[in-house]
């Protein structure tokens, strides 16, 4: 068998070449192609194609390969339900040198089996999870988008050898055993993608690669912001109570929320210069198991709004203030108490603060129940 090697220019792709390469893959063939990390071997998730792939890679049969997709939106065809953290990581890191392992429920796997069939599903989903990669390379994007069947694409190397980072290395290892090689020169990173598992727990790096663990933790952290006027009464209570109930939902200690990928903050539309929470707010939260003694007020800023994934406000006036700071935030700013405002208890007695805290507590629980954790 002769391997066809085709020179491709990532800046001026020949559509006919891509269509022909995709037809080879869909027909059960093996096509090596470049990504931003290393060269991969495109193969359909089918028994005969994978048997051939396992043979040339000297890899034991039955292991699961990573699904490759041409665009981030394509993940919805294979992972119907994702968490907020996974969504943020995809938004920040894809396309890019990152493989994400998504956890799947029994129900979702069963639905995918009906949609994709037993054969493909058996190869793509293992132990209620699927690994997905979305490369940042125009050749890879075009090829994967053009393929009509699910494509896996392990690195172009025999088991135990280093991955190929240019077409010459691919041909040296697999010449005569691949149908086609798309030669676009050297890969940009020349090292494997990072593999990370996203679950309810802390982010788990399964293989080190182009992304550091620290950077991935930053990219996937969901930030939630509470806003009131002075950041001494309502929003500090909302921050503390939300943190408490979110930690309960995640099954972790409050001080470990950051490890689990969540940050809850609060701010005020007025700058009160680092003031403490009011004594009445502190007392109201103590009764609900939350300590506000360490709280110091902060002013609402453009950076805070931009960095937050959700902003919960106490009143419509606060909502308007947030949008004045960042008009593009309209889709992520909501009243904490859905459809109602949280009255300002400032200057009133402890009973009013207790009632306010109770309202915020109920609203926080309801909002957390809506989150895709």
Image (cartoon, grey):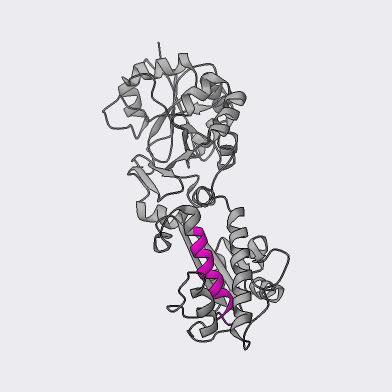
Residue 120 placement, left or right of 313: left
> In the orientation shown, which residue stands out farthest toward the left?
160
Q: Which residues are magenta?
A: 230-246
Left or right of 105 on screen, residue 41? left
Instruction: Please say whether residue 17 is one of the residues in the magenta stretch.
Output: no
* Residue occupying the far bottom of the picture: 347
x then y, percent, for residue 106? 53, 32
Q: Which quadrant of the structure image shows residue 99? A: top left
* Residue in the image at 60% along x and 34% along y: 77
Q: Is residue 155 above or below residue 260?
A: above
Residue closer to the observer: 51 or 28: 51
**Residue 179 image offset from top left, x and y in percent:** 44, 17
Residue drawn 61% across the image and 24% down it = 114
Q: Residue 360, position in %: x, y?
A: 61, 69
Q: Nearer the viewer, residue 195 or 145?
A: 195
Q: Main secondary structure of the magenta part?
A: helix
Is the residue 263 above or below the residue 229 in the image?
above
The location of residue 260, given as percent across then percent down, is: 43, 55
């Amino acid at each position: 068998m002769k391997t066809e090697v085709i020179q491709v220019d990532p800046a001026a792709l020949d559509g006919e070449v891509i269509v022909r390469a995709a037809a080879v893959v869909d027909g059960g063939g093996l096509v090596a192609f470049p990504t931003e990390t290393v060269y991969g071997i495109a193969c359909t998730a089918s028994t005969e194609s994978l048997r051939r792939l396992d043979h040339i890679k000297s890899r034991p049969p039955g292991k699961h390969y990573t699904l490759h997709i041409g665009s981030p939106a394509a993940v919805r065809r294979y992972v119907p339900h994702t968490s907020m953290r996974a969504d943020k990581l995809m938004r920040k890191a894809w396309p890019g040198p990152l493989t994400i392992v998504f956890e799947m429920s029994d129900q979702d796997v069963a639905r995918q089996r009906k949609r994709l069939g037993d054969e493909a599903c058996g190869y793509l989903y293992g132990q209620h999870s699927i690994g997905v990669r979305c490369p940042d390379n125009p050749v890879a994007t075009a090829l994967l988008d053009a393929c009509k069947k699910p494509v896996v694409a392990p690195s172009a190397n025999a088991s135990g050898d280093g991955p190929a980072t240019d077409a010459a290395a691919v041909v040296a290892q697999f010449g005569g055993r691949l149908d086609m090689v798309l030669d676009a020169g050297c890969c940009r990173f020349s090292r494997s993608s990072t593999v990370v598992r996203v679950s309810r727990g802390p982010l788990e790096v399964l293989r080190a690669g182009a992304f550091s663990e620290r950077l991935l933790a930053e990219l996937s952290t969901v930030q939630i912001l509470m806003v009131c006027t002075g950041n001494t009464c309502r929003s500090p209570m909302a921050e503390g109570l939300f943190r408490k109930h979110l930690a309960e939902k995640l099954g972790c200690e409050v001080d470990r929320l950051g490890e689990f990928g969540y940050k809850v903050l609060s701010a005020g539309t007025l700058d009160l210069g680092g003031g403490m929470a009011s004594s009445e707010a502190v007392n109201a939260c103590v009764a609900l198991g939350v300590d506000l003694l360490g709280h110091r007020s902060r002013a609402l800023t453009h950076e805070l709004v931009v960095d937050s994934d959700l902003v919960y406000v106490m009143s419509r006036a606060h909502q308007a203030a947030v949008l004045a700071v960042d008009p593009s935030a309209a889709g992520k700013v909501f009243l904490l108490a859905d459809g109602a405002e949280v009255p300002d208890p400032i200057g009133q007695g402890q009973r009013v603060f207790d009632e306010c805290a109770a309202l915020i507590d109920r609203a926080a629980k309801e909002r957390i129940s809506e989150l895709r954790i």
